[in-house]
Each structure stands twice: as C-alpha cells, then as structure tokens.
C-alpha cells in the first residue's frame, strides 16, 4: 500500500479555541498555505471560525479555509494541535497535564491511524509533556513531532531585552531553554546583541547593574503569561505568531535555529524526555540539536528542569 501523498501547501489546526483560531488567522495572512482545515470536537465552532477568517481572504489572497474531520487532514504538511483545557489564573502549565493527556488520547491516535506523513506540531500546554505524549501515542519518527517549546518565551526575552536596551529585538540573540514553564532557563552566558557580549552592550547603553537586571527580566518573561491570563484569561496572539514562524521555517526549509521541544538522548546528560533546546528546523522537522554553551549554573538548572518534567511524565499512562 502506497504512503499518502503530503500536500506541501496544506495545514490543519486541531482545536479551535483562542490559540487555534488566532493561529488560523495568522496563517491565513502568512501566504504559506493554500488550504487550511480546522478541526474541533465542536464542529460548529470550527465552522464558525473558518467562515469568519475566510471573509478576510479578499484582503490577503486566495486560500481555501474550511472546517473538516480527521479524514480531511491526513495529507496535510503540518498538523498543529492546540486542543486542550485552558490554563486558569493561578494554575501552572503542569497542573493541566492529566486533563490534556486524556484529550490527546482521543486526538493523536486518530491522526496516526491515517498514516500521517507530515509534521506534527504540538502547541497545547504543558507543551513539553504533551510533545512527549504525542510521540508515544503516535509512533511517528521523533524528528517529525515538534513542540512549540520556548519559541514564545525566547521572543518574550528578546522583546524585554530590546525594550531594556532600546535596540531592535531582532538584533538580540538569546534563548530561553528547558521547560516551557516555571523551570525555564534564560541562557545569559551566551546572550549577545549582534555579536557583542550582553554585558558589554548593556554598559554601552548605560546599564551596569547586570545581576539585578537579568533577574528582573527573566522573571518578567516567566511571569508574563500569568499576568496576561489574570487580565484577559488567555494568551493567544504571541503563541499564534510563534506557530506561524515555526511553520514558515518548515515550509520554506529555512534550517533556522529555534528552541523547539523535542526528545533529548544524552545531550547535557538528559535522556528520554522532551524539552526545549535550540535545534535546526527544516522541511523534515528537527535536523539536529545545536550545542549552545552553558555555564555550570545553567547546566544545573537545565537538569532540574528535565527532572521536573520526567517526574510528571512518570505519572502518565501512555
């Protein structure tokens, strides 16, 4: 039996809540795909979102957007899974885990049994644990199951540093790694602004209290989702733009370096859990991890982050 043919111009979003619909809206404007299928347990919700977004097509360019079923998405180049319970105020991403693993047990096997040959992009939280769960439930090759990981956290870090230094955030080179959550790590030791070490650039801009500034910025990045959730009950625009960027890198085979969530096998002494480390991403998913330099404190924090996730993974029935 021949393998299903992947349509490189087709994507699907599973889950049409705030994140799924914002992602679909961002993708409609991106010109990356000519066909976008929305799938939701509530078909009418998916249909309503598809029709609403489709009315913007005359301003963006030709595209087919519609609500569908799992049969409609088997040939998609990328399936983006955003389905799951929302994070409530005061709730951590890890608190969501059992609710959302149960939801994934109804979604991922439906995708897998249709012999899906594209990239599975996991966005639901807690994204690292759910990437791990999706791998176990799908049986897909590891490089084709990617979590959105700390791509958004890294953007938040670049944004905060850009504001602090009054410089274009695109000139800031810095990563958040580890868990997309409370044990995430800002990698200060290798951060730079256009090749200039971060502390040197800070001093050039009149900032000398490096330790306190780093602590404050890392805390702002870590708490930003909680702050937004407390004020408007969900975060969705930032993650939608992050997903659009990941799709762009895959579809265009850019081989860009993104801190996506994937399985680690021995890197930094971490084995058998998914978390975020910089990786080269292209048409076939994750090509290879990029060994960034970490100082001893950052290495210890990364191991702690991995251990936190492994303890949660051990409680799952996968």
Image (spheres, rainbow, N blue to C red):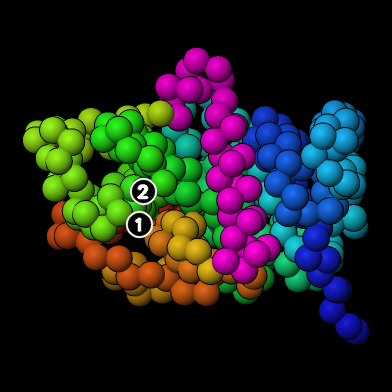
- Write down the residue under mark 1: 306
The residue at the far left in this view is: 208
Residue 189 or 103: which is nearer the viewer? Answer: 189
Q: Could you say which is closer to the camera, residue 176 or residue 166?
A: 166
Pointer 2 or 1: first along the chain: 2
Q: Residue furthest bottom?
A: 1
Q: Residue at x 48, y 17 (%)?
A: 230
Q: Position of residue 132 (x, y in %)?
A: 54, 59
Neighbourhood count class around disc 2 (C-alpha, 10 Å): few under 14, some 14–19, many 20 upward: few
Q: Is residue 259 visible?
A: yes
The local secondary structure at tag 2 comes to helix
Task: Check residue 3 for magenta coloring.
Answer: no
Quadrant assignment, res 204: top left
Kindly identify the residue that appears in the image at 43 percent across and 26 percent down.
226
Q: Position of residue 4 (x, y in %)?
A: 86, 73
**Most distant residue in the top direction:** 231
Determine whether, in the image, residue 272 is placed left or right of residue 87: left
Q: Which residues are magenta?
A: 225-254
The N terminus is located in which quarter?
A: bottom right
Q: In the displayed structure, does residue 171 sit left or right of residue 257? A: left
- Residue labelled with disc 2: 171
Tell me if residue 5 comes above or below residue 30 in the rendering.
below
**Callout in the foreground (2, 1):** 2
Q: Secondary structure at mark 1?
A: helix
């Amino acid at each position: 039996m021949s393998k299903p043919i992947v349509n490189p111009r087709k994507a699907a979003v599973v889950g049409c809540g705030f994140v799924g619909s914002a992602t679909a809206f961002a993708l409609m404007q991106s010109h990356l795909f000519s066909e976008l299928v929305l799938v939701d347990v509530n078909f009418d919700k998916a249909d309503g979102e598809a029709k609403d977004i489709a009315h913007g097509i005359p301003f963006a360019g030709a595209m087919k957007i519609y609500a569908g079923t799992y049969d409609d998405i088997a040939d998609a180049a990328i399936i983006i899974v955003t389905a799951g319970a929302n994070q409530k105020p005061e709730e951590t991403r890890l608190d969501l885990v059992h609710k959302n693993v149960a939801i994934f047990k109804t979604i991922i096997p439906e995708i897998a049994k249709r012999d899906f040959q594209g990239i599975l992009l996991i966005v639901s939280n807690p994204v690292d644990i759910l990437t791990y769960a999706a791998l176990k439930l799908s049986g897909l090759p590891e490089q084709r199951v990617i979590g959105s990981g700390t791509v958004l956290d890294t953007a938040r870090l670049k944004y905060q540093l850009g504001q602090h230094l009054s410089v274009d955030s695109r000139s800031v080179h810095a990563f958040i790694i580890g868990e997309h959550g409370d044990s995430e790590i800002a990698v200060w030791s290798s951060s730079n602004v256009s090749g200039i070490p971060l502390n040197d650039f800070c001093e050039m801009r009149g900032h000398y209290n490096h330790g306190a500034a780093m602590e404050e910025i890392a805390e702002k990045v870590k708490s930003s989702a909680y702050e937004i959730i407390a004020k408007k009950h969900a975060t969705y625009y930032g993650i939608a733009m992050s997903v659009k960027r990941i799709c762009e890198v895959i579809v265009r085979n850019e081989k860009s370096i993104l801190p996506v969530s994937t399985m680690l096998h021995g890197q930094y002494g971490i084995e058998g859990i998914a978390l975020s480390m910089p990786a080269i991403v292209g048409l076939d998913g994750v090509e290879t991890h990029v060994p960034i330099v970490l100082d001893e404190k950052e290495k210890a924090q990364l191991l702690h982050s991995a251990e936190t996730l492994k303890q949660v993974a051990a409680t799952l029935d996968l």
